[in-house]
């Protein structure tokens, strides 16, 4: 008798088909190997930031990418310090992001933030802040080694920042020193340093670094600053101006916007107070945010973090205008904690899409192999923007030029 529980014969072709499907499935899994496609993740993030809807599958993929980036798991590049030599690589990157330069975001908003360098769609200081700038500019004059007015004295302009900053500012210094229109009283000293981002400047004892070549602990960036000022033949009492361009290393680890931008803002605020304590005659800090980073292939400081760093700068200036005590620059209003804050040149443009105001573009060749640091052409672009700014801006040319209008 045939049993109801007997094993049925399975057709041979069915067995072969099933095995083939199983083999294909294993092949797909082996090819996927669980790694995140960071180009895909960046594209999904861009779509999300621009208000485009994502499918449930895309949302899950993006969430997994964020968690892996924050945890530093295998499958993504290890965060590297600013200024480190990175392995040469060829990156395709993004030629544009679709984000709008802050200077052009006049009537629109980004993640709930209005545009304009000074907020509310404005690219120039409000009347009260411009009046404060005019007063401070009138106090800038050549000073002797003791910081007292002297016809033969010096007006010292410093830079402070990370590797990108020193690469760009050192190029600017060479161009400015050769410019016949620069005032002979102005001495330019590059104090920006590779590997010294905002957190390292704000809390040097907490973020001590080791020199990879010697294995020794690197000195505080403030100590290096002292040495460079001394070697330039000037004194702390003659320092009256500073250009600051800062960033954080691996900002994705600090949280999504606005969290990481707030961290950068707070660290720059600490740096400003330290600067004012160190240089009693420091009058003005010109602030800039980062250049385009859409070609970046690692987590050091890619987009949209480079773009979003502009809000850190703007928030600082807005808080000073609003009268925040920790950023006070007016002795009539209490203890002076900070120099006057103004925008320097705004350096970000959306890749190869020309900026409306001046046609600025950032091509792949303007960035080095890592897509984060500027190449020679990129450094020159920033240097030229800096030189133009100091020669033409109403809040700079008076002390920078030999024969200001």
Image (cartoon, rainbow, N blue to C red):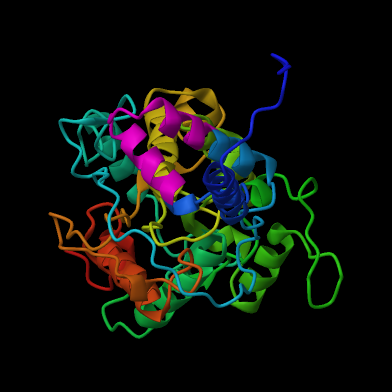
Q: Residue furthest front?
A: 1
Q: Does the magenta stretch include residue 46?
A: yes
In the figure, is residue 257 to the left or right of 125?
right
Q: Residue 15 appears at what percent x and percent y?
A: 59, 44
Please give the name of the residue rendered at 30% of the width and 57% of the height, measured from the top-left corner.
Answer: 396
* Res 146 quadrant in image: bottom right
**Image quadrant for the C terminus?**
bottom left
Task: Count the numbered circles shown.
Answer: 0
- Residue pictured at 64% horizontal, 69% vertical: 84
Residue nearest the observer in this picture, 303 or 41: 41
Residue 208: quarter of image: bottom right
Q: Residue furthest top?
A: 4
Q: Is residue 325 visible?
A: yes
Please determine whether, in this image, residue 177 is positioned above or below residue 353.
below
Find the magenta span and give its range.
40-63
Residue 265 is a magenta residue? no
- The structure residue drawn at horizontal position 43% and vertical position 23%, both measured from the top left corner, is 323
């Amino acid at each position: 008798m045939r049993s109801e529980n007997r094993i049925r014969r399975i057709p041979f072709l069915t067995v072969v088909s099933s095995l083939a499907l199983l083999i294909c499935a294993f092949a797909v899994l082996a090819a996927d190997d669980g790694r995140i496609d960071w180009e895909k993740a960046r594209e999904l993030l861009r779509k999300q930031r621009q208000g485009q809807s994502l499918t449930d599958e895309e949302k899950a993929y993006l969430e997994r990418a964020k968690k892996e980036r924050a945890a530093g798991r295998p499958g993504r590049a290890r965060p590297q310090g600013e200024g480190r030599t990175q392995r040469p690589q060829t990156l395709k990157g993004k030629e544009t992001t679709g984000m709008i330069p802050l200077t052009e975001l006049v009537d629109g908003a980004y993640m709930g933030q209005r545009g304009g360098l000074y907020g509310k769609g404005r690219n120039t200081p409000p009347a009260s802040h411009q009046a404060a700038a005019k007063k401070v500019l009138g106090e800038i004059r050549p000073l002797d080694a003791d910081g007292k007015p002297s016809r033969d004295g010096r007006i010292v302009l410093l830079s402070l920042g990370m590797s990108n900053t020193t690469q760009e500012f050192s190029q600017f210094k060479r161009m400015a020193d050769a410019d016949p229109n620069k005032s002979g009283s102005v001495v330019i000293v590059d104090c920006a340093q590779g590997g010294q981002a905002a957190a390292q400047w704000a809390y040097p004892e907490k973020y001590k670094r080791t020199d990879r070549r010697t294995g020794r602990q690197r000195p505080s960036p403030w100590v290096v600053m002292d040495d460079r000022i001394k070697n330039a033949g000037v004194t702390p009492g003659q320092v009256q101006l500073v250009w600051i361009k800062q960033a954080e290393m691996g900002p994705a680890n600090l949280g999504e916007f606005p969290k990481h931008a707030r961290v950068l803002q707070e660290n720059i605020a600490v740096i400003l107070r330290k600067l004012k304590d160190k240089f009693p005659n420091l009058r003005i800090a010109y602030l800039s945010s980062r250049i385009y980073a859409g070609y970046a292939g690692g987590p050091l400081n890619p987009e949209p973090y480079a773009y979003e760093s502009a809000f850190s700068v703007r928030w600082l200036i807005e808080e000073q205008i609003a009268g925040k005590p920790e950023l006070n620059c007016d002795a009539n209003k209490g203890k002076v904690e900070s120099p006057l804050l103004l925008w320097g040149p705004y350096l970000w443009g959306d890749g190869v899409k020309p900026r409306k105001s001046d046609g600025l573009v950032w091509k792949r060749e303007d960035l080095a192999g890592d897509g984060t640091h500027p190449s020679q052409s990129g450094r020159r672009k920033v240097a030229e923007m800096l030189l133009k700014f100091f020669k033409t801006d109403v809040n700079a040319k008076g002390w920078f030029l030999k024969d200001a209008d």
